[in-house]
Image (spheres, coloured by chain):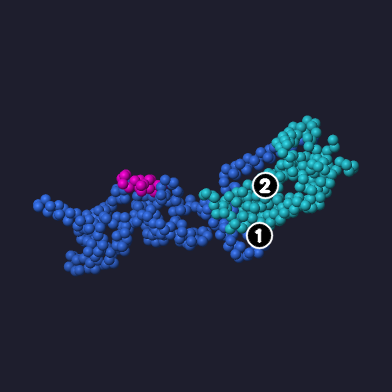
Amino acid sequence: MKVSLSILLFFLCLSSSVRTQAQYYDTPKEHDCLKCHSQQTYSFHNELMGTDDKKLMNPYYIIDTLGLREGVHKQFDCTDCHSYDYTTYPHNANLKLEPLATCLDCHGGDESFASYQFDKIQEEFQKSVHYQAYGDNFTCAKCHSQHTYTATARNSNSILEIVDYSNKMCLSCHNDMRRYGLVSGQENPALIDVHSWLPNQELHFKHVRCIECHTAVEDDLMVSHNIRAKEEAVRRCAECHSENSLLKASLYKYQNLQERAEDGSIIGVLSNENYVIGSHQIPILRTISLLIFFAALGGIIIHGIFRIIYKK
Amino acid sequence: MNSTEDKIYFYPVWLRIWHGINALGIILLIVTGITMNSGFEKGLIEFGLNMKLHNFAGAIVSLNYLVFLLGNLVTSNKKFYIVKPRNFLKRPMKQAYYYAWGMFHGMQTPYPLSEKRKFNPLQKYAYIMVMYFAVPLVIVSGIGLMFPELIFNQVYDISGVLITAVTHSAMGFFISIFLIIHLYVASIGKSPLDNFRSIVNGWHHITKK
């Protein structure tokens, strides 16, 4: 009887602890941290003046509670990463100066996260302009909010969603003067203007990730983290629009039919200015054609010289 | 030179007109085709115009090809393209040997031209390859590129447009090589310019035995 009671108690404890973990952030108003950090204001007792004060919350310290419940770290409590001393309120001001745990403190060298290649990401990231400009101060969290991050590129089936999620990471600073200034110390360039050379800009922005043109691609890394200087970004249309012949083929057909729809007369069809590169897009064929050309030319020159010598 | 017996009227008027249009058209196609294939944006002529010229010249040369087919169908000119199975390889080899060695060592041409033989074997084979293989392929693939909805979507993983474009430019390339050799071999005659005069006035000098 005693044994069965203790087993029952054990399972009761286990189930309650599992339930608590899964529902950490379900009711923010009851959560020790979120009851302030999900609100615009906070209150505290001012011991110096003996008054109850109400102040505005720093907007950067307001947590997106919906995102938090969807994020990859939803099973962790705040003090798993932040200092346990934050449980005292009002917080000790010096806590801000303590270093936070970095991503690699948990994810580095751990076999269970091997498929995410955190160490390789770190290595690539350290070559990027972000690291060169801001050093270790440019933490992973600058792009990947630990509070709300989801592995969208791995889990989503929608290209549009993946593109949107990825680009919002860039835009969180590159489209925000204050956050951009924190790292670069200067005003952020107007993205629409600096990309004005790009045809169909809006479509490109919706369907292509910024990193597609702005990183050095590493074949063995799912998402390249080596973000390069703007001078090294892809600017040639052909890099995307010719090497993938299927993309090019569909573009060619599309443009050709569009033009014919506008003018279907014989003159219109013949005046179509679309073209597609033939054998020159295949390097081996280009080499072979040059060899044949020079062989023919060489043969003719040698034969011609003999004809001159023999006066034939 | 003055006697008529060493000259043969090889090239009737229809054939000379066909040849003239074909020659100019193909030279234009080669120049504009190379520009497109190599992506020279700043050529002799503006890029858009370059493509229009290529399309128009292609249409004219294609229609002209029908003249060639029809002309050969209704006249006796077709007999010059008939290949005899006997010594199928030996005959052109003999002609090649003559060009490479024999003509410099006093050898007589092995296949002298006559009313019955307008082309030597090597020439015949080259013309057949160009006129009945490369040119039809370049025309068909050209029509495909002009009307890409006609092209099959893909073969295995390779797009139909790519296959058509590569066929088109590869055949165009072989026709260009043919043209270079054709022009050079044409200079081997009574005098270097004699054969060029022949294709204009129709009369060809033949070598007396």
Look at the image and give the colour of chain A: blue
Query: How far, Cα to Cα, is label 1 from label 2?
Result: 24 Å
Measured along the vertical axis of the image, is residue B99 above or below residue B154?
above
| Chain under numbered label 2 | B
In this figure, which residue is indicated by the disc labeled 1? A270
Dominant SS of magenta comes to helix
Label disc, if present, on residue B133 of the rendered structure: 2
Q: Residues within 10 Å of mark 1 (few under 14, many from 20)?
A: many
Q: What residue is rendered at 66% in x and 42% in y?
A: A293
Q: Residue furthest front?
A: B85
**Where is residue B185 drawn, in percent x and y?**
75, 41
Label disc, if present, on residue A239 of the rendered structure: none
| Chain letter tied to cyan | B
Tell me if residue A85 can be seen.
no
Q: Is residue B76 magenta?
A: no
Q: What residue is rendered at 31% in x and 50% in y?
A: A103
Q: Which residues are magenta?
A: A109-127
Measured along the vertical axis of the image, is residue A167 above or below residue B167?
below
| Chain under numbered label 1 | A
Measured along the vertical axis of the image, is residue B11 above or below residue A29?
above
Name the one closer to the observer, B141 or A139.
B141
